[in-house]
Image (cartoon, rainbow, N blue to C red):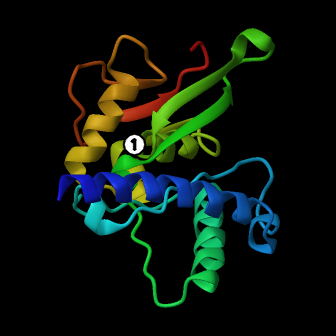
């Protein structure tokens, strides 16, 4: 019934807070970078809406955290299985676009957008094909995310050629003036 599901949802959120507190103090957490962090909500499948799996190759910075959390969680809860819902994840990225305090920004983005933006830590310019191979996202999802980053009112990335749509031959570059 609806009431049971709602109670289960509240219980999941409370248990997730406890799990994250234990994780933060765990040896697994201490083995990964301190320059980034992760917050996970462990949700019981039966209480929450179902979402189709969404492929994504996580950037190294995030993959380390995911693997550390999995190791921690599965060592405490034998026989359980974690399914990561990439489409529901979001990230807070602190970025420096140009020298000085004016160039520092905090971006609240989806995990998909974060995966794309983190590619520009190692490259100033990338083709659509290079980005596609690096993130492993579904084509439609990648186009929507690149469009939001490069074609909207606020342009975190530059797109060449300039247009509203993302095409196979497009190139993307870091917008240092953002």
State left or right for residue 170 relative to residue 52: right
* Quarter of image, res 147: top left
Camera sees residue 144: yes
Percent from the top left, x then y, of residue 133? 38, 59
Compared with 46, 143 (above or below) is above
Q: Secondary structure at mark 1?
A: strand
Percent from the top left, x then y, of residue 29? 75, 65
Q: Measuring 45% from the left and 83% from the top, which residue is drawn there?
A: 80
How packed is label 1: few (under 14 Cα within 10 Å), some, or many (20 or more)?
A: some
Which image quarter is the N terminus in? Answer: bottom left
* Quarter of image, res 27: bottom right
Compared with 110, 23 (above or below) is below
* Quarter of image, res 107: top right
- The residue that label 1 is drawn on is 127
State left or right for residue 103 relative to residue 148: right
Percent from the top left, x then y, of residue 5? 27, 57
Of all residues shown, which one is farthest toward the bottom?
79
């Amino acid at each position: 019934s609806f009431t049971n599901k709602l109670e289960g949802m509240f219980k999941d959120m409370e248990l997730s807070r406890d799990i994250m507190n234990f994780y933060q103090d765990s040896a697994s957490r201490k083995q990964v970078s301190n320059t980034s962090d992760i917050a996970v909500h462990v949700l019981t499948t039966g209480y929450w809406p179902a979402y189709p799996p969404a492929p994504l190759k996580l950037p190294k910075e995030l993959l380390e955290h995911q693997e550390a959390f999995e190791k921690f969680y599965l060592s405490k809860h034998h026989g359980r299985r974690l399914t990561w819902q990439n489409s529901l994840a979001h990230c807070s990225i602190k970025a420096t676009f140009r020298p000085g305090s004016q160039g520092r920004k905090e971006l609240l983005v989806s995990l998909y957008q974060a995966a794309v933006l983190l590619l520009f830590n190692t490259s100033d310019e990338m083709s659509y094909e290079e980005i596609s191979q690096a993130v492993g996202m579904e084509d439609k999802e990648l186009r929507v995310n690149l469009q939001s980053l490069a074609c909207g009112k606020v342009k975190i990335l530059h797109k060449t050629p300039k247009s509203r749509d993302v095409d196979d031959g497009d190139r993307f570059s870091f917008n240092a003036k953002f």
